[in-house]
Image: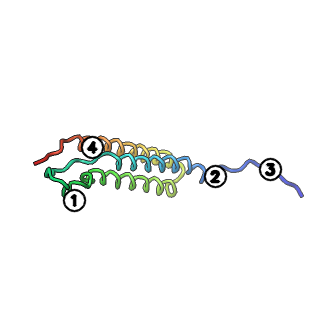
Amino acid sequence: MTNATTAPAPSRHRSLAWWLAPTGVFAVVAIGILWAIPRPAQMCIMIYPPPPECSTGGDPSTVIVFLVLIVALYAAIVTCALLVPARLRLLVLGLLSGALVLVFLVGLAATLAASAGPTYYY
């Protein structure tokens, strides 16, 4: 019984893990950061107890758009990692990862700009 040792062929799944794991962690952290940012204030009456629409912490509509974009971009990264041919995979995954970072930064700037507005009491 001979046991010939050969160098293992590079695994396709291992190379994909180097793209999918960091971008997945980044996507989860980006969603957590965007969700934790204070939302834009609403116009509220100065009474106690406050009306239900004033105690919710603001309108999440600004944040939701960017959360959906981050999830869609990560889904595109996973899809392209599995379906794009090997010679184009590096380029496509690099562009999609850059787009993921860009969407996070634009979402961060837009959410911070929207939350910096004053609270109006009447």
The colour scheme used here is: rainbow
**For the residues carrying marks 4 and 1, which lies nearer the camera in this image?**
1
Do the CB atoms of the residues marked 1 and 2 lie less than 8 Å apart? no
Which of marks 2 and 4 precedes in the sequence? 2
What percent of the width, then of the height, locates residue 28? Answer: 44, 50
Which numbered disc, 3 or 1, marks the residue that appears first in the sequence? 3
Mark 3 and mark 4 lie on one chain; the one further toward the N terminus is 3
Determine which residue is flagged by label 2: 11
Q: CA distance from mark 3 to mark 4?
A: 56 Å
- Mark in the foreground, 3 or 1: 1
What residue is shown at x 13% (from left), y 52% (from top)? 45
Disc 1: which residue:
52
Distance, label 2 to label 3, CA atoms, is: 17 Å
Mark 4 or 2: the one toward you: 4
- Helix, strand or loop status at disc 2: loop
Horizontally, residue 20 falls left or right of residue 95, namely: right
Label 3 close to label 1 by CB (< 8 Å): no
Using the image, tell me which numbered label, if any, was put on residue 5: 3
